[in-house]
Amino acid sequence: MLVISGMMNGAIYGLVALGFVLVYKASAVLNFAQGYMLLFGAYLFWFFRVTVGLPLVLAMIAAVAAGFAGGALIERLTLRRLIGQPLISMVTVTIFLSLVLEGLVSMIWGTYPLQHVAAFPESTIRLGKMVLTTQSLIAFGLALLAAGALIVFFRFTRIGLAMRGVAEGHQIMQSMGISVRRILNVSWGLAGVAATVGGILLGSTLGFQLGMSHIGLLAIPAAFIGGLESPEGAILGGLLIGLIESIVSGYVGNAAGVPAAFVVLILTMLVRPYGFFGLERIERV
Amino acid sequence: MLTLSNVEVKYAGVILVLRGVSLQVPEGKIVALLGSNGAGKTTTLKAISGLLRTELGEVTAGSIEFCGGRIDRVDPEQIARQGIIQVMEGRKVLKHLTVEENLRLGGYIRPAAEVRSDMEMVYAYFPRLREKRTAVTGYLSGGEQQMALIGRAMMARPRLMLLDEPSMGLAPLIVAEIYAIIQRLAAEEGATILLVEQNARAALRISDYAYVMENGRVVLDGPSAALAENEDIREFYLGMGKLGERKNFREVKTYKRRKRWL
Amino acid sequence: MSRIPFYPPSGVYSDSYRKDMRIVKTGKQRLMAIAGLVFLAALPFIPGLNAPYHLRLLIGIGIAVIVALGLNILTGYCGQLNVGQSAFMMVGAFTSGMLNAYWGWPFWASVIPGGLAAAGVGVIFGIPSVRLKGLYLALTTLGAQIILTWIALYGVTVTSAGFTVEPVRLGGIVFNTPQKFYYVALAFTLGMALAAKNLMRSRLGRAFIAIRDNDRAAEGMGIDIFKYKLLAFAICTFYAGIGGALLVHYMMWAQLESFTLQDSVWYVAMIIVGGLGSIEGTIFGVIFITVLKELVLVVGPMAQETLSFLPIGAASGMMLVFIGSVAILFGVLEPRGMAHRWSLIKSFYRLWPFGY
């Protein structure tokens, strides 16, 4: 049972980790605001479903579209101006961004949890002795699907290839006439989509509340353990972290799952510095 | 085709790097830009390609015209789309991508249908790249990386190619090979090239016209063949004194002549 | 020079490395430094500036400067990102606090062990830096934050609840008010800043910079990079430990809540806003961020009262949006930190009226 619930949580971590991978792969920036983008996306969905009263599917589509626009807008307003600047200043900006997003959410919706909305039927499926909820199955399937789509996207499409190029150096891409801004814009938009999808899933299982952003804390080790550049790694990392968390929490208690995940992570990094599927950095003196 | 007149460049508003550079690149010619370290050659190229702006640099005076239009206030991507492609110094390949992916990105601004055939053209010029097609570029040798870079620039079908020190850190044999290809490119494809070099001898051999820069100024220019015979050039850049004479650095006349340049 | 000229000298007259690396280069600089020191020392007696509130703010800034300086040595000079600084601060704080509260050691005896304990733990978490760099290393320090907090919360009973700590004493003076503790904080801050400035001008500092700029090339020059990286971790976390020890003796109360991940992130933000690899920049950055945070604390509740029609938490949310936007704006306009702008202003002043 612990294994199953761990895997299901892990799938959501994996989905969020995909958001990290997307931005990292396209800009070599670790987006500290990913957890808060997820929070914002979830609340957007809640807004369309409850406040506007759209039917479920329409509300999801609207939220995902708004998530894309939001991500692109973030890039447009902040990171665009930092093209060509040291990467670390971009990373800081994402830290501040998380403040703004958290502030916006509590400004519009307040700090109390919102009324519960189920995004998916809350039925259960029995498999022998195990009981699975439909929601977690959908989350699991979606995570795998998203990872597959991203792998294809980065390997075979023009814009996916350009994103990988942008991560290596902005000047190089500009010298080839590739608009770094547009590429970054799209990749942030997609990160917004990943965050919104994760937010909808998480919100309908855990409830819509500010604490949702903390999932970013577990998604980070998931992304790292798999390797920051690899969509398949993010999913596997997510599953692994989910497993460790639920098993350790189950047997040790005291919320030991999170630190345990980090212990495992640090040990893994000592053996494989770039995660299991990460790109080995090529360095020459 | 390309005209720079009195271009002045400042970095961060306080450091003046170019002090009024004027030069011309006519269509279908190879023009060389020579000079020692810090003379402002690379800055000149970056001013043309617009990459200066991401480094806090700015063209503060003068103008740069390309095919009749001013480009000194245009974004680097736009300049590249107009047909000016810079090959940056220091072998800036996209090192975690394969050679073929590098080339595909080079052709990003071209219609997708022509990328295939262009790639064949690049492979025809650089057979070695075809062999290493699926290799990760970061693990190639220096010469191969330089070839991948030039090939990547060719994929964009540039009207003007800005080549920044293609010979840097390469063995003489490889340099010769790369220069032979550049010459072929100029002859067969009618490419226009602005070449920045430290290796004055090689650059003067393949170029039609050359400019010499010192301290952010053009101090000398002329047809390459004539410059190669110029007494000062021979002495300061090619390391050849007057025939049979031993070099004497304390010689006052040389010092004065050199000083005039700076 | 017998007289102190109003204008700076017409150029850089350093004819040796030693002269070029001097902190105080001209007489005018010396004069300004002395004036600044006198001002800082007299501050608790200047009416209008000596309110306990101002002094508390300054003490907070002083402690944060110490912690951020350590971080800047590791991150700015040696190039190793650390997002768990406040956890190391916690180690120092609890070590020093417990020595004081349970074994009766005075502050002066427990502050150094606090720093050393933090440094010891820091070195352990620095070991992965043999193989990891950049963001991957940042992750192990994030792990340090989470693991150390967990240990303090569940592993040790004393630290999870918090405990009282004695104030600092020197002879008959008890430094238990902001006015008095201000001098302790000032002395430590100045001392640690000078030590950092000097350390970074030394052979050690040059080794750190070499590792930051290119660790393989540094290794090729015969610098034992593992040793120096661990040393950088030790210095960084030692500073954190000293800062933590000061904090608990100032608050006279040690608690877990003073050392959160959020705080660690703030320290990173401080050094980046101020300028990586710059001691002066660290001080700018700390002041900037502290004042911003203070604005949230002061203005937030006030806004909540006047705008009562908004949902609960809306006002503090608004302040978060404000502070975040200001910081983003700052990061966008000044991506290389305040120290970069400062050196531009200095060179503009030195070269004026000829811009170059």
Image (tube, coloured by chain):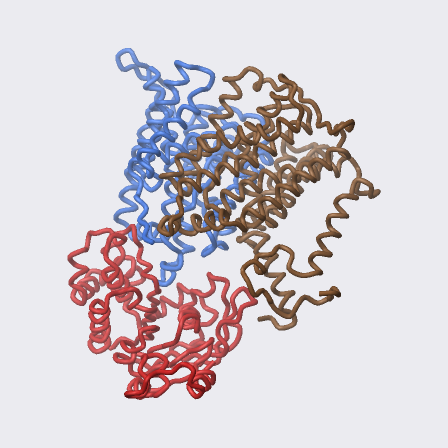
Chain colours: A blue, B red, C brown
Depth order, front residue of A253/B215: B215
> Where is residue C140, by image quadrant?
top left
Q: How many marks?
A: 0
Q: What residue sits 52% from the left and 41% below the top?
A: A95
Q: Give how far across and how far down residue A239 sits, in percent.
A: 33, 27
Instruction: Locate residue C308: give its quadrant.
Output: top right
Quadrant (top left/top right/bottom left/bottom right) for the C terminus of chain C: bottom right
Q: Along the line of sight, which residue is nearer the eye, B237 or B129?
A: B237
The answer, for residue A260, to whether it is visible in the render is yes
Quadrant of residue C139 within the rendered picture: top left
Question: Looking at the picture, how far across and down is residue C18, in whole percent?
Answer: 56, 58
Image position of C205 (left or right of C54)? left
Q: Is residue B238 left or right of B41 when viewed as pictured? A: left
Judging depth in this view, the residue of B96 and A101 nearest the camera is: B96
Place of residue B63 in the rendered image (x, y in percent of width and height, measured from the top left) = 47, 77
- For the view shown, which residue lies furthest in the right direction? C47
Q: Residue furthest top?
A: A129
Q: Vertical placement of A63 versus B259: above or below?
A: above
The quadrant the N terminus of chain C occupies is: bottom right
Q: Position of residue A161 (x, y in %)?
A: 30, 51
Question: Compared to B193, does A25 lie above or below?
Answer: above
Q: Is residue A74 visible?
A: no
Residue in view at x 36 percent, y 59 percent: A172
Please state which of residues C105 and C95 is positioned toward the viewer in this rendering: C105
| Residue at x 53%, y 20% (from the top left corner) | C153
